[in-house]
């Protein structure tokens, strides 16, 4: 398991993202106890305090607040079978809850407000970006929990890079509704046959900056899931067993 040093070393928050080796080490990963042990060893978070989003490539955000105690989510004790369906981002101000999403080429986005103790993790693919997952997540952090974009640090986990992600003309058109012509020029590089290369991380960066997050606080692991065999990649391997995908999580201490 890996973490984002810019988060973990400087602030009372812990991040993680897994690689394929982590799942190989959990031989018999269907055994909940082994998976529980893997997570507990790493972050010392009891499994009942691990909350998963079952992504739908939407812009939907679920807030786990200290008022509700996240009662719906916290009672779920199984690893894969009881995630929170229908959400692509999770936000909380509650310490000790590990918020998780799964990806295989989409961008795992970590967000943390350094003054308000508010954390979020979001699954950002092209559909989610078009549906507003980035501004929606920042908005929930701000409006629900009092976070301020200028205090938010952001990080990207392993995701397909702008040199590998080939998309078709319709995405170019769809993104043009959300990004300026200059931005579209940065995000898309034309290829032959009406195909393009799309840089998802740059799209997220542009949106974060537009929302007021400082450019120097947007950090990238720089890992391309499609180029590195160590990470799950839909483009490289086709549909991946969801429980073998890259797990990204964040927990407030
Ligand atoms: Zn790449």
Image (cartoon, rainbow, N blue to C red):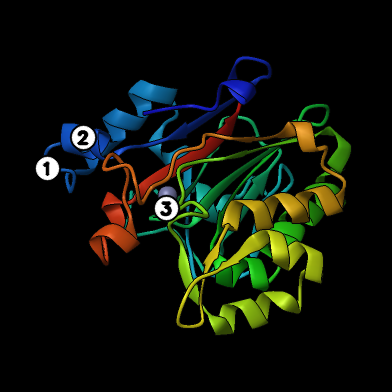
Residue 116 sits above or below residue 90 on the image: above
Q: As displayed, is residue 102 above or below residue 131?
A: above
Which label was assigned to residue 188? none
Q: Are marks 1 and 2 in contact (CB under 8 Å)?
A: yes
- Residue 60: name its quadrant: bottom right
Q: Residue at x 57, y 84 (%)?
A: 170
Residue 102 lies, in percent from the top left, at 42, 53
Q: Residue farthest to the front?
A: 192
Identify the element where label 2 is drawn. helix
Q: Residue at x 48, y 54 (%)?
A: 163
Q: Position of residue 156 (x, y in %)?
A: 57, 42
* Horizontal arrangement in the rendering, residue 77 relative to residue 15 (left or right): left
- Mark nearer the viewer, 3 or 2: 3
Q: Quadrant of residue 9?
A: top right
Q: Of the numbered discs in the image, which one, if any, rests on residue 34? A: 2
Frontmost residue, 227 versus 77: 227
In front here: 240 or 221?
221
Q: Residue at x 50, y 39 (%)?
A: 249
- Packing grade of label 1 (10 A; few <14, some 14-19, many >=20) is few
Identify the residue shown where x is 62% and y is 77%: 172
Q: Which residue is mark 3?
A: 102
Q: Earlier in the sequence, mark 3 or mark 1?
A: 1
Q: Position of residue 16 (x, y in %)?
A: 46, 32
Ranked by sequence position, the earlier of labels 1 and 2 is 1
Image mark for residue 28: 1
Image quarter (top left, top right, bottom left or bottom right) of the C terminus: top right
Question: Residues at badges 3 and 2 in contact (C-beta under 8 Å)?
Answer: no
| Spatial CA span between label 3 and label 2 | 18 Å
């Amino acid at each position: 398991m890996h973490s984002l040093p810019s988060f973990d070393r400087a602030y009372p928050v812990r991040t993680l993202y897994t690689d394929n080796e982590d799942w190989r080490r959990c031989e018999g990963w269907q055994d909940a106890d082994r998976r529980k042990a893997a997570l507990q060893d790493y972050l010392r978070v009891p499994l009942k305090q691990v909350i998963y989003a079952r992504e739908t490539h939407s812009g939907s955000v679920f807030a786990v607040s200290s008022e509700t105690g996240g009662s719906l989510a916290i009672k779920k004790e199984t690893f894969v079978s009881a995630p929170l369906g229908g959400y692509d981002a999770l936000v909380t101000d509650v310490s000790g809850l590990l918020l998780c999403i799964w990806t295989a080429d989409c961008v795992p986005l970590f967000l943390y407000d350094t003054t308000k103790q508010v954390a979020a993790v979001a699954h950002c693919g092209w559909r989610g970006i078009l549906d507003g997952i980035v501004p929606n997540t920042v908005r929930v952090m701000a409006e629900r929990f009092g976070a301020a974009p200028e205090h938010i640090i952001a990080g990207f986990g392993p995701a397909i890079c702008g040199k590998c992600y080939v998309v078709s003309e319709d995405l170019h058109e769809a993104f043009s509704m959300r990004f300026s012509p200059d931005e579209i020029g940065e995000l898309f590089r034309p290829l032959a046959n009406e195909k393009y290369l799309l840089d998802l991380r740059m799209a997220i960066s542009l949106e974060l900056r537009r929302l007021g997050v400082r450019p120097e606080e947007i950090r990238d692991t720089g890992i391309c899931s499609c180029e590195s065999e160590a990470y799950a990649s839909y483009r490289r391997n086709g549909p991946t067993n969801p429980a073998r995908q890259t797990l990204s999580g964040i927990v407030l201490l």
